[in-house]
Image (cartoon, rainbow, N blue to C red):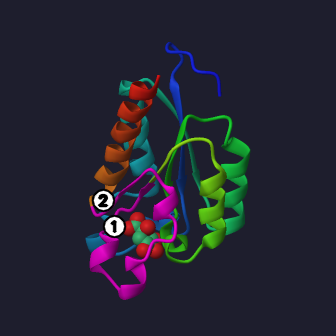
Amino acid sequence: MAENNDAPMKILVIHGPNLNMLGHRDRAQYGTLTLDKLNTLLRKEAQALNIELSIYQFNSEEKIIRTLQRQRNKCNAVILNPAAYTHYSYAIRDTIELLPVPVVEVHLSNIYEREDFRRISVTKAVCLHQIYGKKEQSYIEALHFLYEHLRKKS
Ligand code: DQA
């Protein structure tokens, strides 16, 4: 993608399966915000940084993969919460690997202090960074991390 210092950075945000149910999930793990409220918070933060966000939520692996493939040359970076796919989707891992842009993996909960199966992320190794356990702040931190990363690169 052509770099223009005045143009807003474009960041793709993808929320994986069951994140449309935030507000109805375990609040201790996922916080109290609905997905709409989380997205509003993200858009507000992005606006202050002059970042353009495209936000999607998908419950299927196929849609996550298709969107990552289609958007690979249309954004400068990706914030991805693969949700349960984190722990076993080699298909999503392979898609992340072929992207020309950095990906930050985020989790609302602390995946390292829950059930054993959640301790494994098959996607982490192909992401630039992983942020977890800070509820909605995980996403906000990812936004700031990518903002700084892309600014340094430009
Ligand atoms: C999650 C953690 C995953 O283990 C879980 O399957 C989710 C959400 C998180 O944001 O904490 O659905 O990715």
Label tally? 2
Question: Of the residues under marks 2 and 1, which one precedes in the sequence?
Answer: 1
Residue 58 relative to residue 108: left or right? right
Q: Are marks 2 and 1 in contact (CB under 8 Å)?
A: yes
> Which one is nearer the viewer's eye here, 77 or 16?
77
Q: Hey, what amino acid is under mark 1?
A: Tyr
Question: What residue do we see at 31% from left, 45% from top?
Answer: 141
Residue at x 32%, y 61% (from the top left corner): 132
For mark 2, what is the residue?
A: 135
Ligand 1 image-quadrant field: bottom left
Spot occupied by residue 96 in the image (x, y as percentages of width and height)? 60, 55
**SS label for mark 2:** loop
Q: Residue at x 58, y 20 (%)?
A: 3
Amino acid on which the number 2 mark rests in the picture: Lys
52 with respect to 108 (left or right): right
Q: Quadrant of residue 7?
A: top right
Residue 31 as seen in the image, left or right of residue 92 = left
The location of residue 64, given as percent across then percent down, is: 65, 59
Q: Position of residue 15 (x, y in %)?
A: 52, 57
The residue that mark 1 highlights is 30
Q: Which residues are magenta?
A: 105-133
Which quadrant of the structure image shows residue 114? bottom left
Mark 1 lies on a secondary structure that is helix
Q: Is residue 108 visible?
A: yes
Residue at 36 percent of width and 25 percent of height: 48
